[in-house]
Image (spheres, helix red, strand yellow):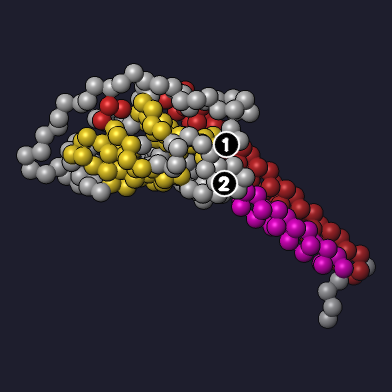
Amino acid sequence: MSTCPAVRTGRRIVLAGAAALTATLALAAPAAAHAEVEADTPQALAKNVTLSFVSEAESASAGFTELRIVLPEGITPGDVRLEEAPKGWKLKATDDGYSVGGPAIKAGVDAEHTIKVRQLPDAKEVAFKTVETYSDGKVSRWIELPTGGVEPEQPAPVLKLKAAAPGAKAVAPSPSSSPTPSPTPSPEVSTTPAAASDTDSDAEAAADDGGSSTGVVIGGVLAALAVLGAGGWWLVKGRASSSES
């Protein structure tokens, strides 16, 4: 027995609504790119440790020009020395960490750099909040920390540390050189990662706004699906009743 036109119409409405919801959820998914940090000696109070940072490219049309790293408590800018970086990139001390940047690297290429720190803090883990700037002026902030067991969408690179070796002691921090603010991104960007407090507050506010917007969009799609489903059911029922009479 063939399906009546009313039933086919109702199915099309529901399928179209489901497709819209799927597309919305895909757009709301967190970015695939991220920033990471590794250490050759991931142990509390370890000395002369090499840290390797990788920032994965998010743009296919613009390359990295600068990375700004906020150092965790226990590591000062004076404790840091640049080991490796993209060609032409230089390290500059900031008030709460350092920036490393230079000529834009090729679009779609990850930004990797290596530093040596005098000593790691006496902690179980340390976070290195990272702000990335692209050649088109866009800024990506990887500064969020887990709260309440929930993984953030823009997590800061975190290095887990083993317990300190027996007898290990913290050395006095190195004197920091005069902070050098990072270059201001192009005019298209309203915020600049020059100050850690501004960077953190702006990025966290943006993350909150993004979550709210996503919730509103998904809520609207779900409401639309409910209306479409009800309309399809009413249409099918009405057509079926007319055919029976």
Which stretch appears magenta? 5-27
Q: Residue at x 84, y 78 (%)?
A: 2
Q: Residue at x 48, y 43 (%)?
A: 153
Is 198 on the left or on the right of 14, as rendered? left
Dot 1: element = loop
Residue lying farthest to the left in this orientation: 167
Note whether residue 35 is visible: no
Q: Nearer the viewer, residue 238 or 41?
A: 41
Instruction: Let me know if residue 14 is in the magenta part.
Output: yes
Residue 241 falls in image quadrant: bottom right
Q: Main secondary structure of the magenta part?
A: helix
- The residue labelled by disc 2 is 107
Instruction: Let me know if residue 57 is in the magenta part.
Output: no
Percent x, y of residue 181: 43, 22
What's the amino acid at mark 1?
Ser
Considering only vertical position in the picture, is 39 above or below 72?
below
Q: Are marks 1 and 2 in contact (CB under 8 Å)?
A: yes
- Crowding around mark 1 (Cα neighbors within 10 Å: few <14, some 14 to 19, many 20+) is many
- The residue labelled by disc 1 is 135
